Image: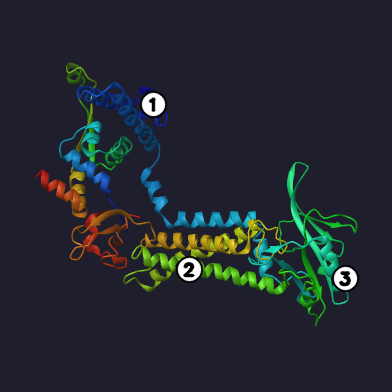
Amino acid sequence: MHWAIRIASWLVPADRRADWRKEWDAELWHHAALLRSRGKPESAVREALWRHARGAFADAAGLGVDVDLWRHEIQSPRLCLIAVAVLFCSVLAATGGFATLRALLSPLPYARPAELAVVAQRAPFMGQIIGVPARRLRDWQTRAAGAAELAGYYWRDEVQHGRTVRVGYATANFYSVLGADPQRSFWFLSRKVDHWVLLGPNERPAMDFGVVARVHPGTNLRALLAPRENTLMKIDVLPLRGQIAASRILAAVALAIALLIVIIARHVHMGRLAPLDTGNLPKAQHRRYRLFLAGKIVPGLLAVAGGFLEWSGAPWLTTNGTSDFSAPLFTWMLALAFGGVLWWSLVDQRDRCRWCLTRLSLPVTMGEWGSALLDPVGTELVCRYGHGALYSGETPSLHPEPDRWTNLDSTWSDLFTHHGK
Amino acid sequence: MATESNLSYTSALILLTIAGGARYGFEIMDVTGLPSGTVYPALRRMEKAELIASRWEAEERAFEEGRPARKYYETAEAGRAALDKALARYPLLRQMAASRG
């Protein structure tokens, strides 16, 4: 194993290398001698020596860096906020500044958007949205003539010049129905569409259509398009603005589900998630502690919402059944992601000093496992700068109690070394 | 003025072991059951903080016994004070220290 020591020694500063190697070589020699004196087989000796020698890398790496400084940085609130900021900025840059999220929150970029609707054809029983064949779209256009104009669209991924692009295809009247200027960059249901191609009258579409309609005021388009044949297929005419509003509501529902999950989880796992017990903290510190929590939750939720909407192409809005995800699945996935952000933020917050926001450390088990009523077991964490201690019960089902934060006064200072700072 | 806690539980255990008579790295590993990747870096940190001091044993003596020389560690005065404080914080270590007398 001396070869491992030799390799690890490259990490050791040159002026200490010889001494360091001499100690490690001697340590391995003594380990091997002890094992052999105990009659261990040679294979067991080799294995134990290898385990021993592996520690040389951690030892050598620790000599080249200031471990205390690193520990201080890792536990500091600064690193946490930087990590959240980096995540937020990365998602912001990757999504073109949360383009889909902004589009959902902005007015629609079409003429008279109140007249626009998406027409969805739903299958019987399960109610999933299915695409509309070109023949049916032509039939609908004929039946709605004079009362509404209907356009079909779909998109798919294609490889062009060795690059995968998402190409949108639409019927020739697509732009006039939308009231959008094709020369301008515009957004229609999915920002992921790289460019649109209008199909000629004799071109056969590769897929079934989603349908968008401009409905003249006072028209009951649903009645006009109602199936004539004996079928269980349902037709939904959904105002586009209503769809956008519904997507906002679904985002709120996802957030509400996430909150519910966190609250339920808190009750199931009682005591582990009572992060905001701040004892008798002064108002200013209390506000700082809460602001730090908000500084994690708000960018985290925005990054998740913006990233998910961009990545999935806002499946709440697609109506031709070609979305990668169904809307309910997407809502649940978003809820779980929101829940993850909330859970992490609260758990991280719980384990931070209420004064300096540094991660608490030096855990100690208090109490007796065999004495659940008189001296229940709990874990105590302290701030390494001596500001306070957090007690957390470990037997919540027997002795439910929330976490307790205690500000430490000067009588505790003996436990901590002082250094000017 | 900020204050910083001195010893983690593991460091306190190693310090207690040295105070109890274990003198070199492998011996400390053997007594505590801690892996080498924990023991040696902790020894370096405590030596840097002047809680322990190290010295090489005389080469002649090691040569007479047919083995390489060992690097011995012993608790410094600051280390004994830090150990007293750590024992106040860690009840299990306090029990271990008491059982050793």
Label 1 sits on a secondary structure element that is helix
Q: CA distance from mark 1 to mark 2?
A: 51 Å
Q: Quadrant of the C terminus of chain A?
A: bottom left
User: Residue at 33% across / 26% down in the picture?
Assistant: A21
Q: Which mark is residue A4?
A: 1
- Name the chain letter of the residue that bears numbered label 3: A
Please tell me in which quadrant of the rendered image residue B17 appears: top left
Q: CA distance from mark 3 to mark 2?
A: 48 Å
Which residue in the rendered view is the most extreme toward the left? B101
Nearer the observer, disc 3 or disc 2? Answer: 3
Please tell me in which quadrant of the rendered image residue A293 appears: bottom left
Q: For mark 3, what is the residue?
A: A142
- Report x, y in % for residue A100: 67, 62
Q: Nearer the viewer, residue A247 or A33?
A: A247
- Mark 3 residue crowding within 10 angstroms, few (<14) / some (14–19) / many (20+): some
Please tell me in which quadrant of the rendered image residue A146 appears: bottom right
User: Residue at 41% across / 60% down in the picture?
Assistant: A347
- Amino acid under label 1? Ala
- Mark 2 residue crowding within 10 angstroms, few (<14) / some (14–19) / many (20+): some
- Report x, y in % for residue A324: 65, 56
Q: CA distance from mark 1 to mark 3?
A: 81 Å
Colour setup of the view: rainbow
Which residue in the rendered view is the most extreme toward the bottom? A218
Label 3 sits on a secondary structure element that is helix
Q: Is residue A274 visible?
A: no
Instruction: Please state if A9 lies on the left or on the right of A216 as rendered.
Output: left
